[in-house]
Image: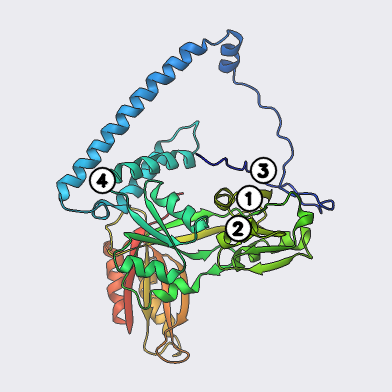
Amino acid sequence: MARKKTPRKQPPQGRSRPAAGEAVGKSSAAAPRATAPPAVAHAVAHAVNLDEVRGKIDSIDEKIHGLINDRARLAQLVGISKTRDGRTVDFYRPEREAQVLRMARERNSGPLRDEEILRLFREIMSACLAQQEPLKVAFLGPEGTFTQTAVLTHFGHSVRALPLASIDEVFHEVEAASADFGVVPIENSTEGTVNHTLDRFLMSPLKICGEVELRIHHNLMGIMNSLGRIVRICSHPQSLAQCRGWLDEHLPNVEQVPVSSNAEGARRARDEQGTAAIAGETAAEVYGLKVLAAEIEDRTDNTTRFLVLGRKLFTPSGEDRTTLLVSVGHTDAPGALSRLLEPLAKYRISMTRIESRPSHRRKWDYVFFIDFEGHADEPHVAKALADLKKRSSLFRVLGSYPRAVL
């Protein structure tokens, strides 16, 4: 039986302290009533024949259904043409899916929004790919985390999502081919980098074959009926930090308890009297909690980026990003980093991110994770990488992959 979703409230116009015991949400001023277009007003005035309209909808639905089945049959042919003995993972092409989604977005003329069109096409592709067997995708669990939402956003719902207890386990399952792909968080626009994900690449042969950018909405939830009954709030440390301003304003005297994941916080909120949690809507549905305050994150642009882990690199999609792991012999030498990065400037390649992490070779020695626009197979990028490799003591292309389609 489908779970009933909690309606999302509108973004706030301002904040105020609640009365004692009052549940708090976000609200907005009432919008002015829209004026119906002349054509619609004319149709209403002349009493639209609903049976006729419904008949046309049924006819369109029948055509859509037939076209979707035609697409599924063509997807079967793509698999058969490659190999009869291959697995679903052998037919998955993230660069092709990114191209399909971009074309769908470009030709969209409404009234459906771009994100709705992208979601529909993602699910169609997911169902077509899963005709023989679903992809197995490992993610940082438990069930109800934002990482699970990222899995479904990127792969659609026709996959077998495997919740795991740690980032290490996600890497291990994909390395052992027990999972086809993995999804892990890499950075948040408010709180910065997830260092443990970066550090795992120092030891792992896995490649990055995709990315997901997920707009993060934090909700306060629990089994109680009002904020006045909250004794403690459990959530992941990053979520607590991303809601620090709201919590200081509305619940300044309530204990904040860091836990391993937002889903773990939601589980405790379900099982413990007086405990509330901060998590996404999915967690409220999974654990049967009431949303006491919606969208309490301090920044309206709060976004988390996730990486899709796989075992091989893919060809260019046309709008790609490349991630490198590099170092030089003596990172403390004057100008070492400048000389290392010079080829990117020489070939006019835009670097979008750089992070340093301890190399674990000796103290005060570092490696660098670099993101830049473009695919490693593009001629000008290939020249820059060849030059950069000559200057490096450590050089690995961790992935060239489609940029997130939003």
User: Which residue is rendered at x = 69% and y = 62% of the image?
Assistant: 233
**Residue found at the far right of this picture:** 19
Colouring mode (rainbow / by chain / secondary structure / one colour): rainbow
Q: What number is the disc on residue 289?
A: 1
Reading the image, the residue beneath label 2 is 266
Task: Tell me which residue sits at (37%, 50%) in the image.
Answer: 159
Mark 2 closeness class: few <14, some 14–19, many ≥20 residues within 10 Å:
many
Q: Is residue 218 left or right of residue 168?
A: right
Of 85 and 307, the residue lying toward us: 85
**Residue identified by numbered label 4:** 132
Report how far apart the C-alphas of labels 1 and 4 lie in the structure: 36 Å
In the image, 346 versus 117, the foreground residue is 117
Which is nearer the N-term, disc 2 or disc 3? 3
Q: Nearer the viewer, mark 2 or mark 3?
A: 2
Q: Number of marks in the image?
A: 4
Mark 1 and mark 2: span between their CA atoms? Answer: 8 Å
Whole-percent x and y of residue 397?
Answer: 32, 71
Q: Are marks 1 and 2 in contact (CB under 8 Å)?
A: yes
Q: CA distance from mark 2 to mark 4?
A: 35 Å
